[in-house]
Amino acid sequence: KAGVTQTPRYLIKTRGQQVTLSCSPISGHRSVSWYQQTPGQGLQFLFEYFSETQRNKGNFPGRFSGRQFSNSRSEMNVSTLELGDSALYLCASSLEGTGPNTEAFFGQGTRLTVV
Amino acid sequence: AQKVTQAQTEISVVEKEDVTLDCVYETRDTTYYLFWYKQPPSGELVFLIRRNSFDEQNEISGRYSWNFQKSTSSFNFTITASQVVDSAVYFCALSEEDTPLVFGKGTRLSVIA
């Protein structure tokens, strides 16, 4: 069974640009969540998509957005990049959601560097 | 509000020593769920265990064991006879009903041969 696939693995962007990250969940999983990991703030929840609808949202500015397609693949977009957006972005896949009843499987992440 | 505290930022042990990683949580809900994840250098978070608030039984899985104590709001993780392959960052996490995971800051464990 294939795991969670995140592309690209590494990305370097310039301040002010925008970026799109992709996540392919495990086959059959309908929930995809995104997390930002930085040395200072740790792992912070961005948002969760379930059956193409955003179900939960973390405390991030509107520059961070996402969507989910009918095949459950998800994309995350960050516009007007800032230096502080440099982080490891992790995607988590689960059957029904990142709530209590299912375990979340994580991808290897996309390491974004903003220069 | 949910909160998870992992007071130990870094721990270093010699191979074959036992090591305990501490996790203290805060929640107002009576129903909640606790998790431990391992993050090796490759980056992905690997699920280790999930425990719900109504099940205080301790659990053992091979060299890993978990001690859940509601009285002290703690969910500690012990690795017995540590090995170099156990070197990683370990995260404790908490979720309430229908809420996303809230993670602690993590504990970096280094096991020295």
Image (cartoon, rainbow, N blue to C red):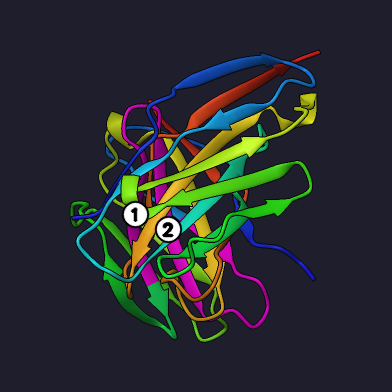
**At which x and y percent is residue B65?**
65, 46
Which residue is under mark 2? Answer: A34
> Horizontally, is A94 left or right of A85 in the view?
right
Q: Residues within 10 Å of mark 1 (few under 14, many from 20)?
A: many
Quarter the N terminus of chain A occupies: bottom right
Q: In this view, does B91 lie above or below B54?
A: above
Tell me if residue A106 can be seen.
no
Query: Could you tell me which residue is drawn at 23 percent across and 53 percent down?
Result: A63
* Amino acid type of the residue tagged 2 in the rendering: Trp
Magenta segment main secondary structure: strand
Query: Could you tell me which residue is drawn at 71 percent across and 63 percent down?
Result: A3
**At which x and y percent is residue B18?**
69, 26
Residue at disc 1, secondary structure: strand
Pointers 1 and 2 within a single chain: yes
**At which x and y percent is residue A89?**
46, 46
Residue at disc 2, secondary structure: strand
* Chain letter of the residue beneath label 1 in the structure image: A
What is the span of residues highlighted in magenta in the rendered image? Answer: A21-48
Q: Earlier in the sequence, mark 1 or mark 2?
A: 2
Q: Whole-Å distance between the Cαs marked 1 and 2?
A: 6 Å
Which residue is under mark 1? Answer: A45
* Amino acid type of the residue tagged 1 in the rendering: Phe
**Nearer to me, A106 or A66:** A106
Q: In which quarter of the image is residue B15?
A: top right
Query: Could you tell me which residue is drawn at 41 percent across and 60 percent down?
Result: A76
Q: In this view, does A19 lie above or below B112?
A: below
